[in-house]
Protein backbone atom coordinates (compact mmCIF):
# COMPACT_ATOMS: atom_id res chain seq x y z
CA UNK A 1 0.00 0.00 0.00
CA UNK A 2 1.93 3.00 -1.27
CA UNK A 3 -0.32 5.89 -0.21
CA UNK A 4 -0.42 7.32 3.30
CA UNK A 5 -3.11 5.91 5.56
CA UNK A 6 -3.48 8.89 7.88
CA UNK A 7 -2.63 12.56 7.88
CA UNK A 8 -1.13 13.97 11.10
CA UNK A 9 -1.63 17.54 12.30
CA UNK A 10 0.63 19.01 13.56
CA UNK A 11 3.85 17.33 12.50
CA UNK A 12 5.67 18.44 15.66
CA UNK A 13 4.59 18.59 19.30
CA UNK A 14 4.81 22.09 20.75
CA UNK A 15 4.79 22.43 24.54
CA UNK A 16 4.77 25.71 26.43
CA UNK A 17 7.58 25.57 28.98
CA UNK A 18 6.82 26.84 32.47
CA UNK A 19 8.76 25.76 35.55
CA UNK A 20 6.90 23.14 37.61
CA UNK A 21 3.85 23.23 35.32
CA UNK A 22 2.48 20.60 33.00
CA UNK A 23 1.86 21.28 29.34
CA UNK A 24 -0.38 19.46 26.86
CA UNK A 25 -0.57 19.17 23.09
CA UNK A 26 -3.32 17.66 20.95
CA UNK A 27 -2.60 15.76 17.73
CA UNK A 28 -5.25 15.12 15.05
CA UNK A 29 -5.20 11.94 12.97
CA UNK A 30 -7.23 12.01 9.73
CA UNK A 31 -8.03 8.67 8.06
CA UNK A 32 -7.55 9.24 4.31
CA UNK A 33 -8.54 5.69 3.31
CA UNK A 34 -11.79 3.75 3.14
CA UNK A 35 -10.54 1.15 5.63
CA UNK A 36 -10.55 0.83 9.37
CA UNK A 37 -7.13 2.07 10.55
CA UNK A 38 -5.61 1.34 13.98
CA UNK A 39 -2.95 3.57 15.54
CA UNK A 40 -0.45 3.24 18.38
CA UNK A 41 1.73 5.98 19.91
CA UNK A 42 5.21 5.29 21.29
CA UNK A 43 7.87 7.58 22.73
CA UNK A 44 11.54 7.52 23.65
CA UNK A 45 10.81 8.96 27.13
CA UNK A 46 7.77 7.22 28.62
CA UNK A 47 8.43 8.61 32.12
CA UNK A 48 8.18 12.23 30.95
CA UNK A 49 5.03 12.03 28.83
CA UNK A 50 1.50 10.69 29.22
CA UNK A 51 -0.49 9.84 26.07
CA UNK A 52 -4.29 9.45 26.17
CA UNK A 53 -5.35 7.43 24.31
CA UNK A 54 -2.21 5.72 23.06
CA UNK A 55 -4.11 3.20 20.90
CA UNK A 56 -7.36 3.35 18.97
CA UNK A 57 -9.25 2.75 15.74
CA UNK A 58 -10.04 5.48 13.18
CA UNK A 59 -13.16 4.98 11.08
CA UNK A 60 -12.96 5.49 7.30
CA UNK A 61 -12.68 9.16 6.32
CA UNK A 62 -12.94 10.21 9.97
CA UNK A 63 -10.71 11.98 12.47
CA UNK A 64 -9.37 10.92 15.85
CA UNK A 65 -7.41 12.95 18.41
CA UNK A 66 -4.95 12.02 21.14
CA UNK A 67 -3.46 14.28 23.80
CA UNK A 68 0.16 14.27 24.95
CA UNK A 69 0.87 15.70 28.42
CA UNK A 70 4.43 16.62 29.39
CA UNK A 71 5.25 16.35 33.08
CA UNK A 72 6.43 19.44 34.91
CA UNK A 73 10.13 20.25 34.51
CA UNK A 74 12.12 21.71 37.40
CA UNK A 75 14.70 23.45 35.23
CA UNK A 76 14.84 24.59 31.65
CA UNK A 77 16.73 22.26 29.28
CA UNK A 78 19.83 23.63 27.54
CA UNK A 79 18.96 25.84 24.55
CA UNK A 80 15.26 24.99 25.15
CA UNK A 81 15.66 21.80 23.12
CA UNK A 82 14.67 18.21 23.86
CA UNK A 83 15.77 15.12 21.96
CA UNK A 84 12.54 13.28 22.77
CA UNK A 85 10.60 11.87 19.83
CA UNK A 86 7.27 10.17 19.25
CA UNK A 87 6.44 7.36 16.84
CA UNK A 88 2.91 6.97 15.46
CA UNK A 89 2.25 3.54 13.94
CA UNK A 90 -0.82 2.99 11.76
CA UNK A 91 -2.06 -0.14 10.03
CA UNK A 92 -5.22 -1.43 8.36
CA UNK A 93 -7.41 -3.67 10.55
CA UNK A 94 -10.47 -5.78 9.63
CA UNK A 95 -13.78 -4.06 9.09
CA UNK A 96 -15.71 -3.44 12.29
CA UNK A 97 -12.70 -3.69 14.64
CA UNK A 98 -13.22 -1.74 17.87
CA UNK A 99 -10.71 -0.29 20.34
CA UNK A 100 -11.22 -3.22 22.73
CA UNK A 101 -10.32 -5.74 20.01
CA UNK A 102 -6.85 -4.33 19.33
CA UNK A 103 -4.00 -6.77 19.98
CA UNK A 104 -0.20 -6.28 19.81
CA UNK A 105 -0.03 -8.59 16.77
CA UNK A 106 -1.64 -5.87 14.63
CA UNK A 107 1.50 -3.72 15.04
CA UNK A 108 4.07 -6.53 14.69
CA UNK A 109 6.24 -6.47 11.58
CA UNK A 110 7.00 -10.16 11.94
CA UNK A 111 3.54 -11.02 10.61
CA UNK A 112 4.28 -9.25 7.32
CA UNK A 113 1.62 -6.55 7.80
CA UNK A 114 2.03 -3.10 6.29
CA UNK A 115 2.73 -0.67 9.13
CA UNK A 116 3.07 3.03 8.42
CA UNK A 117 5.33 4.92 10.82
CA UNK A 118 5.55 8.66 11.37
CA UNK A 119 8.00 10.38 13.69
CA UNK A 120 7.12 13.55 15.60
CA UNK A 121 9.71 15.69 17.34
CA UNK A 122 9.21 17.75 20.49
CA UNK A 123 9.56 21.54 20.45
CA UNK A 124 9.59 23.73 23.57
CA UNK A 125 8.12 27.22 23.40
CA UNK A 126 8.79 29.82 26.09
CA UNK A 127 5.78 31.10 27.96
CA UNK A 128 4.73 34.56 26.72
CA UNK A 129 5.47 37.39 29.14
CA UNK A 130 2.38 39.45 30.09
CA UNK A 131 2.66 42.91 28.55
CA UNK A 132 1.48 45.59 30.92
CA UNK A 133 0.78 48.68 28.81
CA UNK A 134 -0.88 51.74 30.21
CA UNK A 135 -2.89 53.80 27.66
CA UNK A 136 -2.02 57.47 27.48
CA UNK A 137 -4.95 59.68 26.43
CA UNK A 138 -6.72 56.65 25.08
CA UNK A 139 -3.77 55.56 22.90
CA UNK A 140 -1.13 52.84 23.28
CA UNK A 141 2.36 54.10 22.64
CA UNK A 142 3.83 50.76 21.53
CA UNK A 143 1.56 50.05 18.56
CA UNK A 144 0.57 52.19 15.60
CA UNK A 145 -2.86 53.72 15.80
CA UNK A 146 -5.53 52.35 13.51
CA UNK A 147 -8.52 54.46 12.71
CA UNK A 148 -11.77 52.52 12.63
CA UNK A 149 -15.35 53.55 12.82
CA UNK A 150 -17.49 52.38 15.71
CA UNK A 151 -21.22 52.98 15.79
CA UNK A 152 -22.23 55.46 18.45
CA UNK A 153 -25.56 53.85 19.14
CA UNK A 154 -26.46 50.20 18.92
CA UNK A 155 -29.78 48.61 19.76
CA UNK A 156 -29.92 46.21 22.70
CA UNK A 157 -29.79 42.72 21.27
CA UNK A 158 -30.69 39.72 23.45
CA UNK A 159 -30.38 36.13 22.19
CA UNK A 160 -30.18 37.30 18.55
CA UNK A 161 -26.56 37.04 17.55
CA UNK A 162 -27.31 36.33 13.91
CA UNK A 163 -29.14 39.67 13.44
CA UNK A 164 -26.14 41.82 14.39
CA UNK A 165 -24.83 42.39 10.83
CA UNK A 166 -28.26 43.62 9.65
CA UNK A 167 -28.43 46.29 12.32
CA UNK A 168 -24.86 47.44 11.80
CA UNK A 169 -25.57 48.15 8.14
CA UNK A 170 -28.12 50.89 8.98
CA UNK A 171 -26.70 54.36 8.44
CA UNK A 172 -25.81 55.81 11.78
CA UNK A 173 -23.83 58.74 12.92
CA UNK A 174 -20.25 57.56 13.29
CA UNK A 175 -17.46 58.96 15.39
CA UNK A 176 -13.86 58.07 14.47
CA UNK A 177 -12.07 56.47 17.36
CA UNK A 178 -8.40 55.54 17.30
CA UNK A 179 -7.59 52.19 18.97
CA UNK A 180 -4.77 49.72 18.72
CA UNK A 181 -6.88 46.71 17.82
CA UNK A 182 -10.17 46.24 16.02
CA UNK A 183 -12.62 45.26 18.74
CA UNK A 184 -15.65 43.16 18.05
CA UNK A 185 -18.84 45.26 17.78
CA UNK A 186 -20.64 42.84 20.03
CA UNK A 187 -18.17 43.32 22.90
CA UNK A 188 -17.89 47.15 22.61
CA UNK A 189 -21.60 48.00 22.82
CA UNK A 190 -22.97 48.30 26.34
CA UNK A 191 -26.02 46.23 27.03
CA UNK A 192 -25.11 43.68 24.39
CA UNK A 193 -25.16 40.17 25.83
CA UNK A 194 -23.09 37.35 24.48
CA UNK A 195 -25.06 34.29 23.51
CA UNK A 196 -23.25 31.00 22.86
CA UNK A 197 -24.05 29.60 19.45
CA UNK A 198 -24.63 25.84 19.54
CA UNK A 199 -22.18 24.06 17.29
CA UNK A 200 -23.04 20.61 16.12
CA UNK A 201 -20.27 18.16 16.86
CA UNK A 202 -19.17 15.85 14.11
CA UNK A 203 -19.44 12.21 15.28
CA UNK A 204 -15.99 11.38 13.91
CA UNK A 205 -14.29 14.17 15.90
CA UNK A 206 -15.24 12.83 19.33
CA UNK A 207 -12.45 11.37 21.37
CA UNK A 208 -13.21 7.82 22.44
CA UNK A 209 -11.47 6.78 25.70
CA UNK A 210 -9.48 3.62 25.32
CA UNK A 211 -9.26 1.37 28.40
CA UNK A 212 -5.69 0.30 29.03
CA UNK A 213 -5.45 -3.36 29.90
CA UNK A 214 -2.52 -4.50 31.97
CA UNK A 215 -0.63 -7.54 30.77
CA UNK A 216 0.42 -9.58 33.84
CA UNK A 217 2.86 -11.76 31.93
CA UNK A 218 5.17 -8.91 30.89
CA UNK A 219 8.54 -8.95 32.64
CA UNK A 220 10.69 -6.65 30.53
CA UNK A 221 10.01 -3.40 28.71
CA UNK A 222 10.27 -4.01 24.96
CA UNK A 223 12.54 -1.49 23.27
CA UNK A 224 12.49 -1.18 19.50
CA UNK A 225 15.59 -0.87 17.38
CA UNK A 226 15.11 2.85 16.86
CA UNK A 227 14.84 3.54 20.60
CA UNK A 228 11.05 3.92 20.99
CA UNK A 229 9.30 2.34 23.96
CA UNK A 230 5.69 1.16 24.11
CA UNK A 231 4.06 3.26 26.85
CA UNK A 232 1.34 0.72 27.65
CA UNK A 233 3.83 -2.13 28.01
CA UNK A 234 6.13 0.05 30.08
CA UNK A 235 3.36 0.88 32.60
CA UNK A 236 2.29 -2.76 32.90
CA UNK A 237 5.89 -3.91 33.36
CA UNK A 238 6.45 -1.32 36.12
CA UNK A 239 3.32 -2.56 37.89
CA UNK A 240 4.51 -6.17 37.57
CA UNK A 241 7.97 -5.29 38.93
CA UNK A 242 6.33 -3.63 41.96
CA UNK A 243 4.31 -6.77 42.68
CA UNK A 244 7.44 -8.93 42.33
CA UNK A 245 9.33 -6.73 44.81
CA UNK A 246 6.50 -7.03 47.33
CA UNK A 247 6.42 -10.82 46.93
CA UNK A 248 10.19 -11.00 47.43
CA UNK A 249 9.92 -8.90 50.60
CA UNK A 250 7.27 -11.22 52.05
CA UNK A 251 9.39 -14.28 51.22
CA UNK A 252 12.46 -12.70 52.84
CA UNK A 253 10.45 -11.97 56.00
CA UNK A 254 9.26 -15.60 56.14
CA UNK A 255 12.82 -16.87 55.74
CA UNK A 256 14.05 -14.56 58.49
CA UNK A 257 11.38 -15.83 60.91
CA UNK A 258 12.27 -19.44 60.08
CA UNK A 259 15.97 -18.71 60.62
CA UNK A 260 15.22 -17.22 64.04
CA UNK A 261 13.24 -20.32 65.02
CA UNK A 262 16.05 -22.59 63.79
CA UNK A 263 18.64 -20.62 65.79
CA UNK A 264 16.52 -20.92 68.94
CA UNK A 265 16.16 -24.68 68.38
CA UNK A 266 19.92 -25.10 67.85
CA UNK A 267 20.67 -23.21 71.08
CA UNK A 268 18.17 -25.36 72.97
CA UNK A 269 19.67 -28.59 71.60
CA UNK A 270 23.17 -27.45 72.49
CA UNK A 271 22.12 -26.77 76.07
CA UNK A 272 20.45 -30.17 76.34
CA UNK A 273 23.53 -31.88 74.89
CA UNK A 274 25.81 -30.04 77.34
CA UNK A 275 23.59 -31.03 80.27
CA UNK A 276 23.52 -34.67 79.16
CA UNK A 277 27.31 -34.74 78.81
CA UNK A 278 27.78 -33.29 82.28
CA UNK A 279 25.41 -35.83 83.81
CA UNK A 280 27.15 -38.70 82.03
CA UNK A 281 30.58 -37.55 83.24
CA UNK A 282 29.26 -37.24 86.77
CA UNK A 283 27.82 -40.76 86.67
CA UNK A 284 31.08 -42.16 85.33
CA UNK A 285 33.05 -40.49 88.11
CA UNK A 286 30.66 -41.80 90.76
CA UNK A 287 30.88 -45.29 89.26
CA UNK A 288 34.69 -45.27 89.30
CA UNK A 289 34.76 -44.03 92.90
CA UNK A 290 32.27 -46.67 93.95
CA UNK A 291 34.28 -49.47 92.33
CA UNK A 292 37.50 -48.14 93.83
CA UNK A 293 36.04 -48.12 97.34
CA UNK A 294 34.58 -51.55 96.81
CA UNK A 295 37.92 -53.03 95.70
CA UNK A 296 39.68 -51.28 98.57
CA UNK A 297 37.29 -52.78 101.09
CA UNK A 298 37.71 -56.25 99.61
CA UNK A 299 41.49 -55.87 99.67
CA UNK A 300 41.44 -54.81 103.29
CA UNK A 301 39.24 -57.74 104.24
CA UNK A 302 41.41 -60.25 102.44
CA UNK A 303 44.53 -58.84 104.03
CA UNK A 304 43.52 -60.15 107.44
CA UNK A 305 42.96 -63.77 106.24
CA UNK A 306 45.46 -66.55 107.06
CA UNK A 307 48.59 -66.99 104.93
CA UNK A 308 47.83 -70.59 104.09
CA UNK A 309 45.74 -69.51 101.04
CA UNK A 310 47.81 -69.48 97.83
CA UNK A 311 47.17 -66.67 95.26
CA UNK A 312 44.45 -64.04 95.16
CA UNK A 313 40.99 -64.82 96.36
CA UNK A 314 38.27 -65.34 93.78
CA UNK A 315 36.23 -62.32 94.88
CA UNK A 316 39.26 -60.04 94.44
CA UNK A 317 39.82 -61.31 90.92
CA UNK A 318 36.15 -60.69 90.05
CA UNK A 319 36.30 -57.12 91.31
CA UNK A 320 39.52 -56.41 89.44
CA UNK A 321 37.93 -57.75 86.25
CA UNK A 322 34.90 -55.52 86.74
CA UNK A 323 37.14 -52.53 87.37
CA UNK A 324 39.18 -53.19 84.22
CA UNK A 325 36.05 -53.60 82.13
CA UNK A 326 34.64 -50.32 83.44
CA UNK A 327 37.89 -48.46 82.80
CA UNK A 328 38.10 -49.85 79.27
CA UNK A 329 34.53 -48.79 78.57
CA UNK A 330 35.20 -45.29 79.87
CA UNK A 331 38.39 -44.98 77.83
CA UNK A 332 36.53 -45.94 74.65
CA UNK A 333 34.04 -43.18 75.27
Image: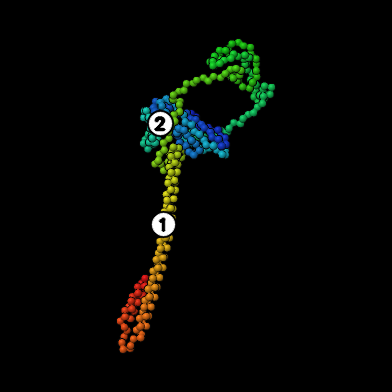
Task: Give percent across and percent down for residue 101.
Answer: 38, 32
Q: The C terminus appears in which quarter of the rendering?
A: bottom left
Task: Give percent across and percent down for residue 158.
Answer: 56, 16
Q: Earlier in the sequence, mark 1 or mark 2?
A: 2
Quadrant of residue 239 within the rendered picture: top left
User: Which residue is at a point 57% across and 15% down the rendered structure image?
Assistant: 157
Residue 49 visible in rendering: yes
SS under mark 1: helix
Label 1 neighbour load within 10 Å: few <14, some 14-19, many 20+:
few
The residue singled out by tag 1 in the image is: 262
Left or right of 78: which side holds 332? Answer: left
Label 2 neighbour load within 10 Å: few <14, some 14-19, many 20+:
some
Q: Residue furthest right?
A: 137
Residue 224 visible in rendering: no
Q: Which mark is residue 50?
A: none
User: Which residue is at a point 35% across and 77% down the rendered structure image?
Assistant: 323
Task: Give percent across and percent down for residue 318.
Answer: 31, 79
Task: Give percent across and percent down for residue 35.
Answer: 39, 27
Q: The N terminus appears in which quarter of the rendering?
A: top left
The residue nearer to you, when weighing 186 against 320, is 320
Quadrant of residue 78 within the rendered picture: top right
The residue singled out by tag 2 in the image is: 99
Amino acid sequence: MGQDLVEIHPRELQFTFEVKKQSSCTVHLVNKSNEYVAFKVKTTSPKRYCVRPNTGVILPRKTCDFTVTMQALRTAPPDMQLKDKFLVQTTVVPYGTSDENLIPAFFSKETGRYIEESKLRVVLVSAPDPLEEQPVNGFHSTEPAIEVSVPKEMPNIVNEVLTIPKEVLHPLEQTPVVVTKIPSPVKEVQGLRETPVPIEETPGLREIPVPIKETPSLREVPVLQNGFVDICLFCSSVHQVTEDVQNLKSKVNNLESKLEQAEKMIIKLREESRTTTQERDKLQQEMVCFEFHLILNVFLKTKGTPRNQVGFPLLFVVYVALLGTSLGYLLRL
